[in-house]
Image (cartoon, rainbow, N blue to C red):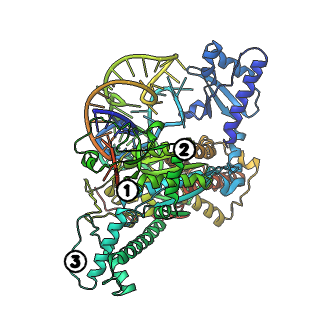
RNA sequence: GUGCCCGUAGCUCAGUUGGAUAGAGCACCGGCCUUCUAAGCCGGGGGUCCCGAGUUCGAAUCUCGGCGGGCACGCCA
């Protein structure tokens, strides 16, 4: 789905190389994987090709000599000019008419512009958020939430069939602790004097859950034995928290297709099932500790050292044979499964359900988990190349120059809801998507709130709004843009800035494809930045002289077509990022004079 | 100690999978609104791309070795 313009250049070079081979001028044992990229410097033409340099070695010729051969052999009628530059670059300049066609292409495709022309047929699952249902979504999840969502949008645009999934860790000690806390809060609603124990959740939301339980069931559980109230308090707590989580996700503009329960994997036998498969495949053994246990010195303060005495032996999985540091336990001595076992069953279920690719977005603190899952899948005979892990690095929240400390245990949560409330959903999302996922960064609340009027997100949105307002103005002025444009009208787009804008517009499909391939949504954002900057420059420069709407009917229609194409392009890109594309933006409040 | 991630302008970060003279925003200085929004534009200062080797036509980018920061290294989830 390369842009037509880039395709012209690549094809022209490939055809020429083949012709040179046929004529005996080049050996060309294999077509080189040369690049066709827009150069950094606009003066270097529309696309720069490094084919001559790549062929220098295999052909035993100088790059510039090969470049000469290619230039002489070129026959394409889309090309206006080719120059040999630097060490042997071929700098192509396309004919204006080819560049101008971009506007037509975009308008013709409409909302399909920027999306893959054809479905890839690949079914891909993106798993993200996957928070414990022991509390609300907080800032610790925020980055992965938006990054995962944008990756899903990106893959969808790239033509994949995407399923978004949320894995609910609703099994084990943590949810049991939740249940116990809920029960105490429930008891307190009837005036009973009970104190929370260490490790229980002191935050207010559990108080609310306790109130709701007593409102629903009255004193029903007060005299009941633990075997009855505990399961009820657990499931009620999870249910309430999930409701809260779903509501937060909705506010964040994030949606999941499937919520998958860890507890269900245990109850359905899927966990036992995957263990049986491993046993059948001779991938397990019984032992007191992993046979290939690493005896490297560990930091005395590490948790590994702290919990060393709890290791009693059981059933081990031979993950060490497939890239993991050592084998991992999957069944404790008492036969119960550990977290990893359920996660292996879960990942197996993804492939059983027919997904071709599985992408996990999770925090960098789970990075050590990756090799185990990969090894576990390989031990099932599943190619682990079908799995990709996007590790979202830890983020710090900074206010007044200081880190905001949060702790679930202490009850000092910073909820995603509060963050969105404070800075707005678009600003929030934008701030996360501005960075690559695997680099740490500080979320400076002062920077995004105090300076809200010059926050980058508004710069972006203003670009779209400006396009919209010009189109609106044209309609009011009696020269509406009707969605169609002729070659003659397009031919009026001769200003260098117009040419550059059209060229940048034409690159969206390549940017989307590249970003999807790399699972890096932020590339789309930086592409928008360049596109919008180009537009603002154009607008400002010609504000007094060459306005979009003028007495020249052909020029007006040509320019309106370009503006409409730009608006369409931005809308598509914003859609991938999940940021809204406003038609109009209110002028910002007057800043107090700071002079 | 071992593994993974990061180190680019005063600050926050990009850098098109190895390309040409390393960019943007913020901050600072100086300009631009009678016309389609000045939430914008133009100009200026600001760099040991952490350090050192190596790979090649060519390195911020790849390899190795250091230094600095973060996250992990559990039969918690």
Q: Nearer the viewer, mark 1 or mark 3?
A: 1
**Residue wearing tag 1:** A334
Name the one closer to the observer, A461 or A348: A348
Cβ–Cβ below 8 Å for labels 2 and 1?
A: no
Question: Circle 1 marks a residue in which chain?
Answer: A
Q: Are marks 2 and 1 on the same chain?
A: yes
Residue A194, label in figure: 3
**Residue placed farthest to the bottom in the image?**
A218
Question: How many marks are shown on the rendered structure?
Answer: 3
Q: Which one is in front, A406 or A381?
A: A381
Q: Based on the displayed image, in which of its 4 quarters is residue A502 positioned?
A: top right
Residue A266, x across and y down, in percent: 47, 61
Q: Secondary structure at mark 3?
A: loop
Q: Quadrant of the C terminus of chain A?
A: bottom left
Q: Position of residue A177 (x, y in %)?
A: 32, 67
Q: Return the x and y of residue A459 as percentages of the image width and height.
A: 47, 54
- In the image shown, does A281 or A230 lie closer to the viewer? A281
Image position of A412 with respect to A381: above or below: below
Mark 2 chain: A
The vertical placement of A178 against A351, above or below, is below
Residue A281 got which mark? 2
Check if mark 1 and mark 3 are on a common chain: yes
Q: Is residue B31 above or below residue B4?
A: below
Residue A506, picture quadrant: top right
First in residue order: circle 3 vs circle 2: 3
User: Is the residue marked by circle 3 packed among few (<14), some (14-19), or many (20+) residues within 10 Å?
Assistant: few
Tag 3 or tag 1, which sits nearer the N-term? 3
């Amino acid at each position: 789905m390369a842009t037509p313009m880039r395709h012209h250049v690549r094809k022209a070079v490939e055809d020429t190389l083949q012709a040179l081979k046929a004529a005996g001028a080049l050996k060309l044992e294999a077509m080189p994987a040369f690049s066709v990229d827009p150069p950094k410097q606009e003066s270097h033409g529309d696309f720069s090709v490094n084919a001559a340099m790549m062929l220098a070695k295999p052909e035993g010729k100088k790059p510039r000599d090969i470049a000469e051969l290619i230039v002489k052999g070129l026959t394409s009628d889309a090309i206006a000019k080719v120059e040999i530059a630097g060490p042997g670059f071929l700098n192509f300049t396309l004919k204006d008419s080819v560049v101008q066609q971009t506007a037509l292409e975009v308008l013709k495709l409409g909302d399909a512009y920027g999306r893959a022309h054809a479905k890839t047929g690949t079914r891909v699952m993106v798993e993200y958020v996957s928070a414990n249902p022991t509390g609300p979504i907080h800032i610790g999840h925020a980055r992965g939430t938006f990054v995962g969502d944008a990756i899903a949008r990106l893959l969808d645009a790239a033509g994949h069939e995407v399923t978004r999934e949320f894995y609910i860790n609703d099994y084990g000690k943590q949810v049991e602790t939740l249940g116990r806390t809920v029960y105490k809060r429930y008891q307190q609603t009837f005036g009973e004097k009970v104190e929370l124990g260490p490790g229980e959740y002191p935050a207010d939301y559990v108080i609310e859950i306790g109130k709701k339980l007593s409102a629903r069931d009255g004193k029903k559980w007060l005299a009941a034995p633990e075997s009855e109230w505990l399961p009820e308090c657990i499931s009620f707590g999870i249910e309430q928290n999930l409701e809260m989580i779903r509501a937060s996700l909705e506010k964040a503009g994030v949606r999941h297709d499937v919520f998958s329960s860890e507890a269900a994997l245990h109850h359905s036998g899927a966990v036992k099932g995957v263990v049986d498969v491993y046993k059948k495949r001779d991938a397990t053994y019984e032992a007191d500790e992993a046979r290939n246990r690493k005896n490297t010195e560990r930091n005395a303060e590490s948790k590994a050292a702290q919990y060393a005495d709890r290791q009693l032996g059981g059933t081990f999985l031979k993950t060490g044979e497939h890239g993991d540091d050592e084998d991992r336990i999957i069944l404790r001595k008492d036969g119960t499964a550990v977290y990893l076992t359920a996660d292996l069953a879960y990942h197996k279920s993804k492939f059983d359900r027919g997904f071709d690719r599985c992408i996990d977005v999770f925090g960098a603190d789970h990075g050590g988990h990756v090799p185990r899952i990969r090894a576990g899948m390989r031990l099932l005979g599943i190619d682990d190349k079908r799995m990709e892990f996007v590790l979202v690095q830890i983020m710090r929240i900074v206010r007044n120059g200081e880190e905001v400390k949060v702790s679930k245990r202490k009850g000092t949560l910073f909820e995603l809801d509060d963050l969105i409330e404070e800075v707005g959903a678009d600003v929030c999302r934008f701030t996360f998507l501005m960075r690559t996922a695997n680099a740490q960064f500080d979320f400076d609340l002062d920077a995004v709130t105090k300076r809200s009027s010059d926050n980058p997100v508004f710069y972006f949105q203003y670009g779209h709004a400006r396009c919209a307002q010009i189109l609106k103005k044209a309609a009011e002025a009696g020269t509406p843009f009707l969605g169609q444009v002729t070659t003659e009208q397009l031919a009026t787009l001769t200003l260098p800035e117009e040419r550059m804008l059209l060229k940048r517009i034409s690159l969206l499909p390549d940017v989307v494809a590249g970003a999807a391939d790399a699972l890096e949504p932020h590339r789309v954002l930086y592409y928008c930045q360049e596109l919008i900057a180009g537009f603002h420059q154009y607008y400002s420069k010609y504000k007094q002289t060459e306005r979009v709407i003028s007495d020249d009917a052909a020029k007006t229609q040509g320019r309106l077509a370009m503006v409409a194409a730009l608006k369409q392009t931005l809308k598509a890109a914003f859609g991938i990022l999940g940021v809204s594309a406003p038609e109009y933006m209110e002028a910002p409040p007057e800043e107090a004079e700071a002079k």
